[in-house]
Image (cartoon, helix red, strand yellow):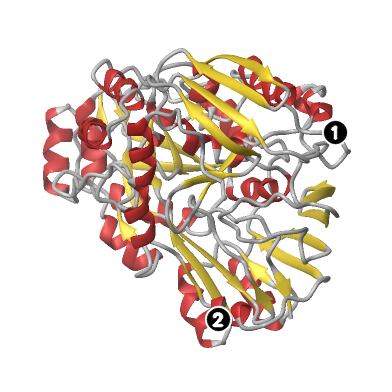
Amino acid sequence: MQPRARRLRSALVLVTSLTVLLTACGGSDDSSGDAANSTPKKGGTLTLALQQSPQSANPRAFTDTGAVYVNRQLFDSLVSQDPETGKIVPWLAKSWDISEDATEFTFHLRDGVTFSDGTPLTAEVVKANFDDLVANKAKVNPSIAPVAGAVASAEVVDPASVKITFSKPNAPFLVAASQTGLSIVAPATLELPWDKRVDKVIGSGPFVLDTFASGKVTLSKRKGYDWSPGSIRHSGDAYLDKVVFTVVPEASVRTGSLQSGQIQAVSDVPPGDITSVRDSGLKLVTRPNPGLVWGLVPISARKPLDDVRVRQAIALSVDRTEVRDAVLSPEFKPATSVLASTTPGYTDLASVVKHDPAEAGALLDAAGWTRSGDGVRAKDGKELSLVVGWFPGYTASQKTLELIKAQLAKNGIELKLLQQTGLQILEGLKKEKYDFFWTNGTQADGDVLRTSFSGAPPNYYRINDTTLEPLLQEQVATGDPAARNKILAQAQRRIVEEVVYLPVFEQTTIVATGKEVHGLTLGAGAGLNPLTPVWLS
């Protein structure tokens, strides 16, 4: 069913413009032929190994890989984004209207949807979700904080229709609404204090949460589920009886367990294991991630990163091609902008995102950071020693950071790696404990720049760029795709030239499964799709 007629025409074009990019970069699933030619079987348990424990089953608290994989099975969103076409399609909302200025979005809910505790989905429930989002805007994950801060009101139009109003035009809101962070949770969960929602959550998704513990999360099929998004092309409840997410930190152990048949799937396949996995007859499901590339956020409120010359010198000292060749694999691309090349609105800035250690040294000399021999540079008796906060949410992070550390050392810059948990990272950013934060962000829309680098609260990165901020706000209010892409191009250039972000490489999601697993796919944002169509032979 198509959305109703009264909508912002340019926003329609904007969403449709995702089609070519997402289709061109589309992921591959080596299992597609098997699933298409066989009769799916019901029952069984899928065990999927993660590198790190999900931080929370509260979809608004964390958006790391583990949390997104788990929470997509528990919670549904108002809309979905088809990974092959980029089109926004119905899910909990059967249709929607958009005001001419893209400040009002009215969703008309489908009939018969219930949460796993039996509570029906109503406009009042959706309103309560957005009210809760606004009330907790200081606590939500940084990636969705800008949406929470921009919501002006949520209003019940009728029992099955709810209107979300923004303080300013918000052309890319439908893409954000399709993501796990803005999924709809049950009233019983909203009634809990924020810190009690870690493992006591109720959603309308195809699975229910049995246990949520460090190292293992177990889900059970919810009987009677029948509202998968059109992009999944599946009707009825899930084929699987159970899903187990188990944590196996060591990459080689994850791969070995898959090859031996102890588990059926692994996320985050190490680049060095791709060939052996493929050669052993196992299946690979891959998708290049749109959005913010992996990189370092400099906390420029901290000295000496308040000097743009120091930030530029560090960026020029990073050899991205060496990172790809030494740590990753040909499935990955060195960054050529702050956005991945598969993101709508991407602009190629390879001429700026480059490796030039000689220019880096000259910039540091000009900034007063000198060195004797091969030692660490110093200025006014203080060494150029910086701390990067990171947590092991991705297999290649540690090796990448160790290589970057070695690359910077060649130019007299000392980089100290401080591994943290997700909770420690948030607290450390609030207290300005780090000089850099290692991160990325998956989103099939250029608005990821605003959600990452806006100076609006909570502004974890302490960004105060009076040239960048108007660009970030202007693009979100621009419905015409061509005009919006020009603004996004300016924003990318500003971010790269001023090193508001130091891009390193584009992420590619790689999941491996056993031969017996069929129907597992990745979504538009390269996260795990709902597992309703997955079955075991």
Which residue is located at x 53 percent, y 73 percent? 284
Between 45 and 372, the one lying in front of the other is 45
In the picture of the structure, the residue carrying the numbered disc 2 is 33
**Quarter of the image holding residue 6?**
top left
Identified by mark 2, the residue type is: Gly
Circle number at residue 205:
none
Location of residue 520 in the rendering, given as x and y in whole percent from the top left corner: 62, 66
- Quadrant (top left, top right, bottom left, bottom right) of the C terminus: bottom right
For the question of whether residue 454 can be seen, the reply is yes
For disc 1, the neighbor class at 10 Å (few under 14, some 14 to 19, many from 20) is some
In the picture of the structure, the residue carrying the numbered disc 1 is 119
Between 259 and 235, the one lying in front of the other is 235
Location of residue 137 in the rendering, given as x and y in whole percent from the top left corner: 59, 19
Which residue is located at x 48 percent, y 52 percent? 524
**Circle 1 sits in a helix, a strand or a loop, which is it?**
loop
Considering only vertical position in the picture, is 97 above or below 400?
A: above
Which residue appears farthest toward the bottom when viewing the image? 280
**Left or right of 118: which side holds 392?**
left
Between 467 and 203, the one lying in front of the other is 203
Which residue appears farthest toward the front when viewing the image? 5
**Left or right of 471: which side holds 248?**
right
Identified by mark 1, the residue type is: Thr
| First in residue order: circle 1 vs circle 2 | 2
Which residue is located at x 33 percent, y 54 percent? 21
**Circle 2 sits in a helix, a strand or a loop, which is it?**
helix
Disc 1 from disc 2: Cα separation: 39 Å
